[in-house]
Image (spheres, rainbow, N blue to C red):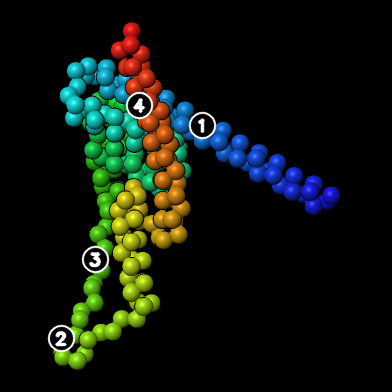
Amino acid sequence: MKARMQSSSSSSSSAAAAASAAAAALMVKQEFFEKWIKGLQIYSSFNKEMTVMERKRAIKLSADVAIAATRSATTRWSRAVVADVSTSAAGAARTAAEQILGRKLAERRALAATCSRRIVRRSRQRRGKAAGRGVVRSSAAIAKKLVRNRTRVLKRLVPGGMKLDEISLIKETLDYIASLQVQVDVMRHLAAAAERLDHQQISI
């Protein structure tokens, strides 16, 4: 009897946690959607006859800044996205980004001076040229090299990842993936809604 009660209590706690996580995810999606649409509206007000490429850039920049804004500068990757926009965006793009974030972006010259990236060059191991003196690598050494290579690739994929240690990189990557999933989910729902609307108009 006692075991059943404990099992029931555990199930209730799990269900409550799942419901709370789902509600939090829904709020993030709603916040992203509102900020994303706001950025697109600002872009459209500047240029009502955008080309296909201009529209693609507007969609991407607004989506990137909007998803970074949902993290409120609490993560390295979100700050890196905003810093990149600060150094590259101008005109409508800069105005849209500032409206999405709700604040002015840092001046490009000042930001470029303070956020310059350091290029770290790592020396590669040289193979012995003499016959019969080949380097025999252990499985542990091969595994370490694979980890280093994959870590290097991951750092290039995650905004701001080049300055992170391995533990911080894993945390940032998980958060970045979750944020990208929010982008994908919202865009997928929006595309599906637009497709249904098109079908309804055709049928009418």
Q: Mark 2 sits on what residue?
A: 129
Mark 1 or mark 4: name the one nearer the start of the chain: 1
Q: Quadrant of residue 99?
A: top left
User: What residue is shown with label 3?
Assistant: 121
- State the quadrant of the C terminus: top left
Q: In this rendering, which labeled residue sits more in front, label 4 or label 2?
A: 4
Q: Secondary structure at mark 4?
A: helix
CA distance for labels 2 and 1 = 61 Å
Look at discs 3 and 1 and give the one toward the viewer. Answer: 1
Q: Nearest to the eye among marks 2 and 3: give it.
A: 2
| Residue at image mark 4 | 191
Callout 2: helix, strand or loop? Answer: loop
Name the residue tied to disc 1: 26
Amino acid at circle 4: Ala
What separation in Å lies between label 2 and label 3 (alpha carbons)? Answer: 24 Å
User: Separation of disc 4 and disc 2 at Cα?
Assistant: 59 Å
SS at circle 1? helix
Q: Is residue 125 above or below residue 63?
A: below
Whether tag 4 and tag 2 are in contact, CB under 8 A, the answer is no
Q: Nearer the viewer, residue 15 or 67?
A: 15
Q: Secondary structure at mark 3?
A: loop
Residue type, label 2:
Lys
Q: Amino acid at mark 1?
A: Leu
Which class describes the residues within 10 Å of circle 2: few (<14), some (14-19), or many (20+)?
few
Q: Which mark is residue 101?
A: none
